[in-house]
Amino acid sequence: DTAVSQTPKYLVTQMGNDKSIKCEQNLGHDTMYWYKQDSKKFLKIMFSYNNKELIINETVPNRFSPKSPDKAHLNLHINSLELGDSAVYFCASSQRFLGYTFGSGTRLTVV
Amino acid sequence: DQQVKQNSPSLRVQEGRISILNCDYTNSMFDYFLWYKKYPAEGPTFLISISSIKDKNEDGRFTVFLNKSAKHLSLHIVPSQPGDSAMYFCAASANQGGSEKLVFGKGTKLTVNP
């Protein structure tokens, strides 16, 4: 009965590969997000979707493409992975500020 | 350009004493502030929040104080317990198109010694 679940939890891949991280929330929230926690431990927003519509798109390389098939899912696809993409990626959802909830994170390591 | 700053990377307190975690912000458009707690290999967990129209919000052992003129907020935990040992992140938001973007501080690692 996990509220915000993301898979996989760990992902190790080679440079140049394409990979996806999936996120699902069962809270009925309208808004979903992707955050990135880099090596300096900063948590920064990448994207947010409200009812499948892209609302926030921070300065993120075009190699990152979010996809929201429905309001309960927000997947993150990354093309041509680079070493600098190594980080922990957190999915989150909210209904206004009520219950702004994070997933447990996906640790991506690019080798 | 850090809009939310947590200048103390770590804090150690004794069990039973008060823990005070501080946070400063620069963007006067921020109107909502949150504190998150995070254990290793887990996502941030919401702890407590405060709207800019208030200066204090209390929930059990946790109290958040907001000083808008100083652009400063603090989280008080009293009494501190060993289970409170974790990373604490301050976050702020200025509602953006109906989608709440959170700007996080770098975090403070709290260690509560038994």
Image (tube, coloured by chain):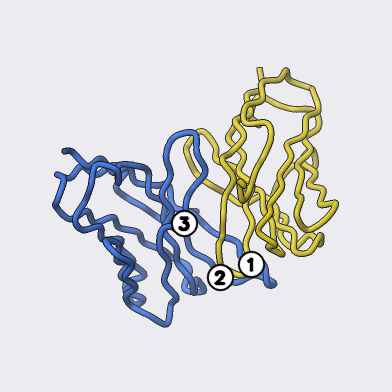
Chain colours: A yellow, B blue
User: Could you say whether the residue bearing mark 3 is in a helix, strand or loop?
Assistant: strand
Picture disc at residue A95? 1
Q: Position of residue B89 (x, y in %)?
A: 42, 51
Relative side of A9 to B109, left or right = right
Amino acid type, callout 3: Phe
Amino acid type, callout 2: Ala
The residue sitting at 81% across, 52% down in the picture is: A68
Chain for numbered disc 2: B
Q: Position of residue A83 (x, y in %)?
A: 65, 24
Q: Residue furthest bottom?
A: B53
Q: Residue furthest right?
A: A69
Chain for numbered disc 1: A
The count of marks equals 3
Residue wearing tag 2: B94
Residue B14 lies in quadrant: top left
Relative side of B76 to B37, left or right = left
Picture disc at residue B86? none
Chain for numbered disc 3: B
Residue B64 lies in quadrant: bottom left
Same chain shared by disc 1 and disc 2: no
Residue wearing tag 3: B46
How packed mark 3 is, by other alpha carbons closer than 10 Å (few <14, some 14-19, many 20 or more), is some
The residue sitting at 36% across, 52% down in the picture is: B6
Amino acid type, callout 1: Gln
Circles 1, 2 touching at the beta carbon (< 8 Å): no
Q: CA distance from mark 3 to mark 1?
A: 14 Å
